[in-house]
Amino acid sequence: MKINFAGKKALVRVDFNVPLDKQYNITDDTRIREAVPTILEILKEGGSVILMSHLGRPLEKLNADGSINKEKFTLNHLVKHLKKKLKVKVQFADDCVGKSAVKKAAALKPGEVLLLENTRFYPEEEKGDEAFAKKLANLADVYVNDAFGTAHRAHASTTIVAHNFDQNHKCFGMLMEREIENADKVIKNSVKPVTCVTGGAKVSDKLLLLERFLDFADNIIIGGAMAYTFMLAKKGQVGNSLVEQDRVKTAKEFLAKAKAAGVKVFLPKDSVCADKFAADANTLVAPSNLIPDGYMGLDIGPAAAKTFAGVIRKSQTIIWNGPMGVFEMPAFAEGTKTVAKAVASATKKGAYSMVGGGDSVAAVNQLKLTKKVSFVSTGGGAMLEYLEGKELPGIKAIRE
Ligand code: AMP
């Protein structure tokens, strides 16, 4: 981080949107743990930290009388855990901009941490309201954005607030720096051969990403249900597989563009097919373009897995988004497992690998391979948009 925080109050936007159980215990504290290094660094330099975040969607789940369900959505639920992780006292302001926030922020001393109440208690947050953002900005001397997962939203606390600080008084947090650096490594400075692996449910979700891959990939591997729309584009029979009829033409055009660009596209030769979408379905292996009536492809087959793994192992840069099949059910997890292991093995031999966006992260976690790939992005939708080449408002607001 480029700012010297000594004696400064830093307003830090973190992503503390953590899952809570019915008793408001944190069930996965990844996002809190990831924010810790940035907070500790500011404290170490002699600054103080004012944390702000959203939690859930309080304005969409109001109480019957129209009031905010503060009991459910308060960030106070996180204070105890945060204190444990930081090993310093954490104060809490029960409003993010009102009197209590102003008073507590003003009294904050170097080495101290203050957590503000959920920014989404105010409709102004998601509207990106300038006046509301100014009130947040007035609490501190400098602004740090460490919430990469929300950088694609032009909300008050993620983007608009930054307009109140000049270049010497705003910067990215360490988590955000890492996410940007790793994404840039694959899209701007990648060592060839570059292989992009995509999967998951829908072509429509990944189309922009696929188009973008054409700019820098040598190989594009397509698995998951997406592959069956491509099979239709190649006049295959896909039985009851999940397809998007309205994307068949686009899939066909994409294949032509890839050919013209000299990018190799790998579709699964075979598939593990099931007679119903269930863990205990009857299964058979069939060519992906000849899936029998009454069956649906729920995983790439063994021949496809072998081909995909071979391409991955020969790559120097790998970017993976989306599972190869319905990996949540063991009967259809083999393809994703094989691909994950190939990514890990290529990484061990020196390749750079990045796993990002949604379910492939869950797959890598499930297979306990998180430490065997170069970088796992927690950026979800924001990472997808960054890779697609979009300028994320939260990033732009810090850079301009
Ligand atoms: P996405 O969020 O687009 O990455 O999609 C992930 C989801 O796609 C996972 O929940 C998978 O179970 C699902 N998926 C992957 N392959 C298939 C398939 N062949 N048929 C149906 N769903 C699939």
Image (tube, rainbow, N blue to C red):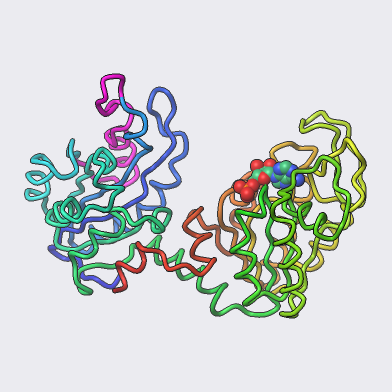
Q: Position of residue 246 (x, y in %)?
A: 69, 52
Q: Tell me, yes or no, if residue 68 can be seen here.
A: yes
Q: Does 40 sit left or right of 376 as displayed? A: left
Any magenta on residue 86?
Answer: yes
Quarter assignment of residue 42:
bottom left
Q: Quadrant of the N terminus?
A: bottom left
**Residue 217 on the magenta segment:** no
Q: Tell me what residue is drawn at x 78 percent, y 41 percent.
A: 332
Q: Where does the C terminus fall, quadrant-wise?
A: bottom left
Residue 171 position (above or below residue 68): below
Q: Nearer the viewer, residue 110 or 29?
A: 29
**Does 246 sit left or right of 60 as displayed?**
right
Give the x, y percent position of residue 225. Answer: 74, 48
Q: Is residue 326 visible?
A: no
Is 76 located above or below residue 291 in the figure? Answer: above
Q: How many labels sit on residues? A: 0
Q: Position of residue 156 (x, y in %)?
A: 26, 53
Q: Quadrant of ligand 1?
A: top right
207 vs 254, left or right, is left
User: Which residue occupies 36% across, 45% down?
Assistant: 16
Q: Residue at x 85, y 47 (%)?
A: 238
Q: In the picture shown, does residue 3 fall above or below 109?
A: below
Q: Residue at x 27, y 61 (%)?
A: 144
Give the image quarter of residue 59: top left
Q: Which residues are magenta?
A: 63-91
Expressed as whole percent of the image width and height from the top left, the position of residue 58 reads 33, 34
Q: Which of the two residues, 262 or 332, is positioned nearer the viewer here?
A: 262
